[in-house]
Image (spheres, grey):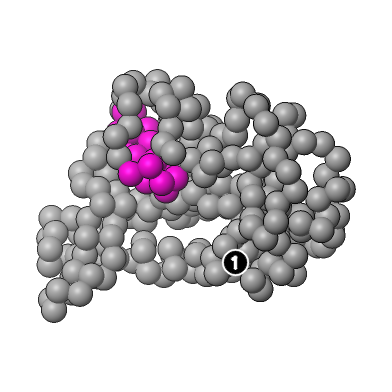
Amino acid sequence: MGLRMHSLQRFYHWISTTPSLFELKSPFEQLSSLSISPYIEEEYQGNPRLGFIYQHLCTQLLTQCDKYSLLKEEIQINKPCGQTLGAIDLLLHNHELKRNEHWEVAIKFYLLHGGTWYGPNAHDQLDKKLARMLSHQLKMSSTDEFISQYPNYNDLSEHLLIQGRLYINPFSPETIPDTCLGLFINQSQITGYWCYQSQWEQIGEPLYELEKPLWAIGLQEFIDPINKPNGRFVHAQTKSGQFWFVVPDTWPKG
């Protein structure tokens, strides 16, 4: 499933107004301070996966404002032997500060369990993702391989836009961490709930399943509520707008 025009407009607005998952201290960014133009593209023809839609809309937001212009996007960095080192999301020119910038963008959803923020696929963890973005992805623009490929783009500043939502289990409460890797979590983004399949009856109101491209913005029309999931994780919401993950009782181990 992709996104229809109206949903793309809602997602575009969501990106432009939603705070970072982390407090705003370099390299973290959010886009709410920009003068944002309306979303004008008629339709999105790219990869329908959430991360690709998100990066596309971030690019539109950043390059339709007066502050930035796009230099390059999705740059593959290769070692001399041909092995891929990775990809850089965006190179932008900041007209106000008269500098070139390296931006990485990511949308993530994490569930707190035992002091660790896990993705619904528990192989993904916030601490691991953050460490990789800070120590690998943002550093690719200062590697010898990048500089040799793009000698005109040296001395780039580093910028990380990471948005999404953090989820806690209201039926198995635990202390919510203030930080991850010593960086302060934006507590305003801990707005989701999650529970085990065996805690389903405690939710107390119908849930409506979300296709992944709608994980950020949710539904506006509600048709059929879901039954109790069996052996798979489900992301859903209530009519009142509360987001829920329901995960198997074996999660995060299986």
Across and down, in percent, residue 110 comes to 62, 56
Does residue 20 appear anywhere in the picture? no
Left or right of 141 on screen, residue 28: right
Amino acid type for the residue under numbered disc 1: Ala
Q: Looking at the rendering, which quadrant does residue 218 occupy?
A: top right
Residue pictured at 38% horizontal, 53% vertical? 104
Residue that badge 1 annotates: 122
Q: Is residue 62 magenta?
A: yes
Q: Which residues are magenta?
A: 47-65
Residue pictured at 43% horizontal, 63% vertical? 133
Left or right of 78 on screen, residue 166: right
The quarter in which the N terminus is drawn is top left
Residue pictured at 64% horizontal, 55% vertical? 233
- Badge 1 crowding class, 10 Å Cα cut-off, few under 14, some 14 to 19, many 20 or more, is some
Across and down, in percent, residue 219 comes to 60, 30
The quarter in which the C terminus is drawn is bottom right
Across and down, in percent, residue 204 comes to 86, 40
Does residue 249 appear anywhere in the picture? yes
Q: Residue furthest bottom?
A: 81
Q: Which secondary structure type mostly characterizes the magenta part of the structure?
A: helix
Across and down, in percent, residue 175 comes to 81, 62
- Asked if 199 appears above or below 39 in the picture, the reply is below
Q: Looking at the rendering, which quadrant does residue 135 occupy?
A: bottom left
